[in-house]
Image (cartoon, rainbow, N blue to C red):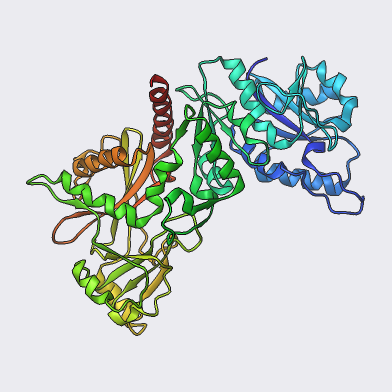
Amino acid sequence: MGVVGGVILDKSVVLASNSSQHENPSLQPGADSLLRMLRHSKIPTGISYDVGLSDDKVSLLKRLATLYSFDCFILNASSIDDAKNEIMLAWGDTGGSILHVVSDKKKEFFPKLSNCSWLIIVLRSLGQESADVIEGGSSCENSSMIFINKLEELPSTVCHINRKATGNSVVTVGYVMKPSREEDFAKRGAFPLYPTQNGLIFMPLTFELPLSPQLQEVDIVLHKATDGIKSIELKSRTNFSNRIVYTSGMQDLQRYLEDHPDCCVIDSFNNIYPVLDRLEIQEILLCLEDLKTEGRSTIRGPRFLKVDSFKEPDLLQRLSEAKLSLPSIVKPQVACGVANAHNMAIIFRNEDFKDLSVPLPAVVQEYVDHSSTLYKFYVLGEKVFYAVKKSTPNADILMKLSESNGLKPLVFDSLKSLPTAKEDQHYGDGNCSKATNSCVDLDLVTDAANWLRGVLDLTIFGFDVVIQEGTCDHVIVDVNYLPSFKEVPDDIAIPAFWEAIKKKFELKRSK
């Protein structure tokens, strides 16, 4: 059996079995996420149906094929050879095995399909599930067929086939994150089901299936745990890990990793906690003082103050002691993972604190005039990349915006940001050459990136830098885990992403 060269989804695994012929056709559970995954897998994919299928179902299948850039084939038990020729014309020599995924309700197809050198993946009907397992998964295989109980098992089945065909030197990366983020990475080619140039295969983990058998199939776990946060209680005095409530699936992953310390993970749950807490990150950034060198610009965090209530009687005195002047920017202490983590405000008058709607506890930071220019840095293992973007304007311009509204605070969601002029984006390569941009000291920021990597013990993270007008201080205003790094061209960023993962695995294995 070779690698998977193509996938044909029979209509019996795409469309749900409707109880009435008069109901509008709908998709099988799990079909939508499978179609999205296959769309970006670079594996030729088709949808097949037989003659006599109702017009409304044919119309839906053709719309799906168009939407996901698939092919449509008519496939009857009596015309397998004709269908094979049509598929060969559409796909050419795929260089691998064709998987035909079909429901066990179409058993009359099996003998014919077995004779055409295709590998049959049989989706068992509800109530027909078997307890048999192979290789730690829930599928069961014989010489010509592999049985699965849910469509969600197909990606791991493809990974299993490809790994078996290419040898044990391939490293399997199991990844889990919210669907929109997964699709964003996948469409840029970051999660191939085939081995990468450095020997990685990416297998999506799903909470729709028992997690432990899936994790036994992978060598590395890549997660965006913040996508699975339900709530964070910062007012509690317990350890940070006990103040986060994850979804049940993410809790299962966390328990598994705690029970299997030898499992390679990028990065551990404990290591990402500092980037969830703006106060803790601010306190960490205070230690950037250690990087001060005579003759170089200063790199630092902004001045800050934690606030538990905007009605504290001594708030103004505390702001003065923290050397915070107006305007200031107010951010929730929780940095990500909850809905209001990005609700912020820029304050111009002291009296506006008392009615502020920013969630508490909050962090008040100095607002740094930075000529509307933001440097986004991405750390992928040992490599550092950056992009230059437009940012919020200087304080005098913000003041004019606020004056038009009676000097009220400027309240905004930082994910949507304040209106800015259209920007020309630039990127820097892993060398971070100083000659690339005359404004930012890339050697200085690279030193800070390496320092942060050591302090946080993270493999893949990002941080934002603004350069203060007048002083040329480089101020780190945000740190985040597993950013999209989409501002960096894919042909540069994705191989660096793979390299960072592989090196982390090799380092773990060497220990």
Measuring from the top left, give residue 39's x and y in whole percent.
Answer: 62, 38
Specify the quadrant of the image occupied by residue 436: top left
Specify the quadrant of the image occupied by residue 381: top left
Specify the quadrant of the image occupied by residue 5: top right
In the image, residue 287 above or below residue 197: below
Quadrant where the C terminus is found in the figure:
top left
In the image, residue 401 above or below residue 447: below
Q: Is residue 213 left or right of residue 15?
A: left
Measuring from the top left, give residue 9's x and y in whole percent.
Answer: 75, 33
Q: Give the total of numbered labels.
A: 0
The residue at 81%/18% (across/down) is 114
Q: Residue furthest front?
A: 237
In the image, residue 468 above or below residue 272: below
Q: Is residue 301 left or right of residue 408?
A: left
Measuring from the top left, give residue 103's x and y in whole percent.
Answer: 82, 32
Give the camera-side residue of 79 and 369: 369
Whether residue 125 is visible, yes or no, is: yes
Q: Residue furthest bottom?
A: 406
Give the camera-side residue of 450 and 387: 450
Whether residue 190 is visible, yes or no, is: no
